[in-house]
Amino acid sequence: CVRCSTSEFHLLSIVGISTNIHTNRVCVYVYAIICSMRDIVLTYESAVEEAGSRGALETKVRSGGLFKIGRGIYSSSEHPDPLVVAHVLYPDAVITMDSALASYGLTDVPPDKVHLATARDATRISRPGYRQYFTERKLLDPGAVEKDMGHGTIRIYDRERLLVEVMRRQATLPLDYYREVIASYRRISEDLDVRLVEDYMALFKRQDAMFDILQREVL
């Protein structure tokens, strides 16, 4: 038997496995089922530390115990969620725009890249497969939330901040895509925290134009 965390016990209750809350223990084979529900994504440094040495890491990759999915990045899955990978590689960045919209089900269009917002003074992302949005540091964090994807954690804008980002970039988006996203927001308008949307709009210069879009097209 092994000792499990509180979050693991929550998962056990979901699948209907009985546990002993007094001993805080559960059978090993059940624990393995829980762990398999998550992608383990590691940087090279973390992978070496986990394996014990560089040689042990190479052996683990050759045996299929770990997959090298890109430069300096490893995973327990051959095809991990790219958003989870992005969070491991760039923990201070925030998933935004096309990637965030698809994650929330606000568009049916799959993004061809992972869209990340970073501070304006952050290093430019040269790794292929990413689109970077440089943002003033004071504007980067408002609305950023940790979201558990079930197979890993990501840092993403909440739906309210994401709506503000869409309105800010209206002129640069394809018209059909913009209409689809706004229609999706209109369908969930009663679930939105409108006051929070207004608070986010107040952080930017074009808040009057965005307020007009909010009232005319979303609410």
Image: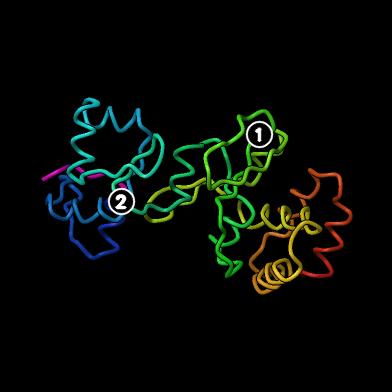
- Residue at image point 59% right, 49% down: 115
In the image, residue 44 above or below residue 1: above
Range covered by the magenta-colored residues: 1-6
The answer to which image quadrant residue 37 occupies is bottom left
Q: Nearer the viewer, mark 2 or mark 1?
A: 2
> What residue is shown with label 1?
119
Q: Quadrant of residue 92?
A: top right
Residue at 68% in and 67% down = 181
Q: Residue 160: image x %, image y %?
A: 67, 56
Where residue 165 sits: x, y (%)? 72, 52
Q: Which picture quadrant has residue 141?
A: top right
176 left or right, relative to 72: right
Label 2: which residue? 77
From the image, which quarter does the C terminus lie in? bottom right
Taking depth in this image into account, of 69 and 47 the one nearest to the observer is 69
Q: Percent from the top left, x then y, of residue 26?
A: 15, 50
> Does the segment drawn in magenta span residue 28?
no
- Seen in the picture, residue 192 relative to 87 is either above or below; the reply is below
Badge 1 marks a residue whose secondary structure is strand
Is 2 in the magenta? yes
User: Residue 157: x percent and y percent?
Assistant: 61, 50
Identify which amino acid the numbered label 2 is placed on: Ser
